[in-house]
Image (spheres, grey):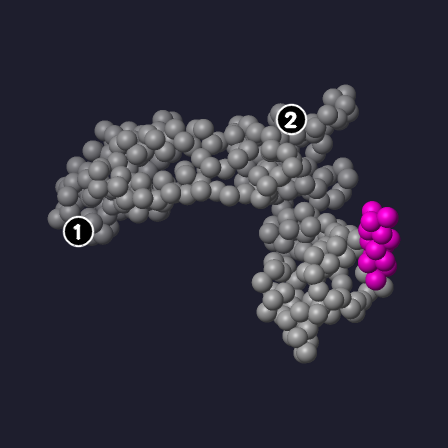
Amino acid sequence: MPKTSARLLALLSLLQTRRDWPGGLLAERLDISLRTVRRDVDRLRELGYPISAVKGPDGGYRLRPGTELPPLLFDDEQAVAVTVALQIAATTVGSGLAEPAQRALGTIRQVMPARLRHRVNAVSVTAVDRPATRPAPPVDGDVLLALSTAVQAREVLRFDYGTEDLSRPPRRVEPHHVVTWSGRWYLIAFDLDQREWRTYRVDRIVLRTPNGPRFTPRELPGGDVATYVTSVFRGSTDGSGNWPCQGTVILGAPAATIARYTREGLVEEHGDGRCRLTVGSWSWPSLAAAIARYDADIEVVGPPELTAAFAHLARRFARISD
C-alpha cells in the first residue's frame, strides 16, 4: 500500500478528473479498501478540500469548488512544472504579474522537501525578448484577469481606449483572445460598431461594467490566432499572414550562405554560386533595404515596385554621400 501522503495525492488527482467518483471505483484504482477511501476523504476535508458525498450503491464522492484556497498538494512532476511556469511569469516584462509570481515561487520553494528543492533549483529560466525602442508599460493583473474571463465566458466587453474623449460612447467588442507580443499584451476582438477585427493594447484599456450579452465566437481571419496575430504585426491587411510587399531577386551568393542569415523567406539554389530569394516586408523601400543587407550582387526578378524601390533608395543614398 502506498504511503499516506502519496495516496492522498493520488486520491485528490482522481477527484479532479471527473465530476463524480463511486467509492468502489476509487478503492479499485488506488488498490485500497473502501474504509481507507473514507478515511482519506476525511483527511482531505480536514485540509480544506470541499468533498461532498454522492448517493449510490456503495457511496461516492465529488470535489466541489471551494470559497478558500486549501493547501496545495503536488506530486514531483507537478511541482517542477509549476516552478518552471512561475519562473517564466517572473521574468515576463510588462504583465504586472512578475512580482507576485516571484513571491509565489519563493513560497513554494520554502515548503518543498529538500530532495525536490534541489531539483527545481537546478532549473533556471531566462526570458530574452526582442529589444524595444521603449519599455512596455506595465499591465494591471486585474485587467488581464477580467479580459480573460470575458473571453472564456464569451461576453461582450465595453471599454474606453487610450486618451479618447470620455464623453463618447464606450467601445463594444466581442473579445476572442488575450495575447502577448514583443513584451506587450493585446486583446484580439471584433469591434461591433466598426464591424471589423481589431487589436487593442491592454495597458490602454479602461473597462466599463457590467459586461454585455453573450455572443457566438466568429472565425478569425487566417483561421487561427497565431496566423492572425503574425499578420497584424507584419502589416498584412487580410489576416493571411502574408507580407503586403513581396518580391523575388537573384543574389550573387550561394544559397547556403544566404540561408544562414534569412529568418523568413524562401532561399533556392540558382546555379553558378547564386541563389534565388523570395521575401516580404511591410513596404517596398524596407524590402529593398532588407535585401541589400546581404552584400551581394542583386538582380530583381520582380515585381516592378521592387525595382522602383531600389532606384528610390539609390537616389537617397546618393544625396547622403554628396
In the visual, does 303 lie left or right of 29? right
> Which residue is labeled 1 in the image?
31
Main secondary structure along the magenta-highlighted residues: helix
Segment tinted magenta in the rendering: 307-322
Q: How crowded is mark 2: few (under 14 residues within 10 Å), some or many (20 or more)?
A: few
Please report the residue visible at 21 percent of the width from the left and 42 percent of the height from the top. 115
Q: How far apart are marks 2 and 1 (CA)?
A: 54 Å
Residue 94: where, in percent of width, then height? 55, 33
Seen from the viewer's position, the closer of residues 43 and 129 is: 129
Q: Which element type, helix, strand or loop, lies under badge 1?
A: loop
* Placement of 302 over or under 282, stated as above or below: below
Residue 267 position in % (x across, y down) = 65, 68
**Mark count:** 2
Of 321 and 12, nearer the camera is 321
Would you name the residue on which mark 2 appears? 206
Q: Which of 289 and 2 is in front in this view?
A: 289
Q: In this view, does 169 lie above or below 15?
A: above
| Residue 215 in view in this figure | no
Q: What residue type is labelled 1?
A: Asp
Q: Where is 306 relative to 13, above or below?
A: below
Q: Nearer the viewer, mark 2 or mark 1?
A: 2
Q: Is residue 320 magenta-colored?
A: yes
Q: Residue at the far front: name it.
A: 322
Q: Can residue 190 be seen in this view?
A: yes
Determine if the magenta segment contains residue 301.
Answer: no
- Please tell me which residue lies in front, 237 or 172: 237
User: Identity of the amino acid at label 2?
Assistant: Val
Q: Which residue is situated farthest in the top direction here? A: 167
